[in-house]
Image: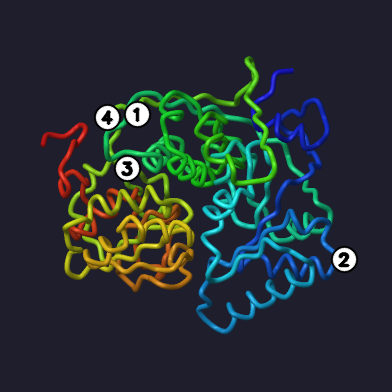
Amino acid sequence: MPMTTAEKILAAHCGRDEVRPGEIVMADLDLALANDITAPLAIEEFRRSGAVKVRDPRRIVFVCDHFTPNKDIRSAEQVRLIRDFSREQGIENFFDVGEMGIEHALLPEKGLVLPGDLVIGADSHTCTYGALGAFATGVGSTDLAGAMLSGRAWFKVPVSMLFNYRGRPGEWTGGKDFILHTIGRIGVSGALYAAMEFAGPAIHALSMDDRFSMANMSIEAGAKTGIFPVDEKVEEYVRGRSGRRGRSFPADEGAEYAARFDFDVSGLEPQVALPSLPSNVRPVGEVKGVRVDQVVIGSCTNGRLEDLRAAARVLQGRKVARGVRVIIFPATQRIYLEAMREGLLEIFIEAGAAVSTPTCGPCLGGHMGILAEGERAVATTNRNFVGRMGHPRSEVYLAGPYVAAASAVAGEIIHPARVAGGDRPGEEN
């Protein structure tokens, strides 16, 4: 029977010819991931099981990125526990200060995830790797402990939903705007436990950085995973990064989808998600008079080099509005270095922004940019739930790097063309 991409990847990792939605299957994993919050819980469960050795240390990755550099004694103890366990078990893919990055940017950069892989991570945004044509999904720490022990995990085969994008977006619109627009249309449970498969000419035109942003926020629509086709851009991205070879699993003609959506992104304005759901989306032109106290540019959604270039394009030669704090988080050490070589960090600092070492920072209300009561932030992160970035009576607005940078200059949420010039689709200049 014809299968979708998600079904094909699961079938291949089960050693079966086919799987169907709703089946419970056990599958061999290519990689299991945890961070400085979730790894200690998984290690504790691993110990509790009586296990002595992990199944395959080459397929386990620990990235200390949430409270790193350590913000307090407790976070320091958690990282030490992971460090000691990694040394004991021979886990080479342990990334700490100085070589770590935000996990979902670091793993693709290091070539640890390839097309066709089956990946679980004790972090909900593990779905980011779907940009590479992998089936990647978040799990709990107990399931991760089981994967460390056995090299396998159970899955309920999800239904698949097809999202087709066509048209040419404007100069200020990218992958973050595509996915915000999509979530605004279908809601935060619109793809509940489904595999979102992205397709269409507008998708093939997107850069890899834009695709990572879209796949990352599949979970914000309730999806189990979000998967992109393996095309020449994916193949070019992974070339030379790994000693392994990836596999492409294109959906069969006649494969069944639970739903199909078609989006024309021609003239799509930059999108903004208002508090307190990623589905509360409006075009930026409809968001007026919203003053901001803080702007955060970074995270596993929009901390890659293209995101920093976008922010720098708006900030160059301009100053951050008085009273606005701007924090920029390059997603990995390599991105930090490349941004420095290109002069982006100089642009940020001269504009009045602070540049941080790679870390998740305030995205989860962790540290380095927590909001006080009544404060309002524009962030290129992925969630804007109540209290997500600090005080329960603070507010977070989600946007792409162009809107975030423009809002930093204006002191309020604004279309980037009003700050930097250029086209404003759907509006008069």
Report the front residue among 93 and 273: 93
Q: Is residue 16 left or right of residue 184?
A: right
Q: CA distance from mark 3 to mark 2?
A: 48 Å
Percent coordinates x, y for residue 114 in the rendering: 63, 41
Q: Cβ–Cβ below 8 Å for labels 3 and 2?
A: no
The disc label shown at residue 271, or none: 3
- Give the alpha-carbon distance from disc 2 to disc 1, as whole Å: 52 Å
- Residue 378: quadrant of the picture: bottom left
Name the residue tied to disc 2.
51
- Which one is nearer the viewer's eye here, 37 or 401? 401
> Which residue position holds label 1?
265
Cα–Cα span, label 1 and label 3: 12 Å
Q: Residue pushed farthest top?
A: 254
Image quadrant where residue 115 sits: top right
Which residue lies at the image location 40% right of the left edge and 39% below the top edge?
175
Residue 267, numbered circle: 4
| In this view, 117 is above or below 159 | below
Q: Secondary structure at mark 3?
A: strand
User: Under tag 4, what secondary structure?
Assistant: loop
Q: Earlier in the sequence, mark 2 or mark 1?
A: 2
In the displayed structure, 164 sits above or below 59; it is above
Asked whether the beta carbons under mark 1 and mark 3 sit within 8 Å of each other, the answer is no
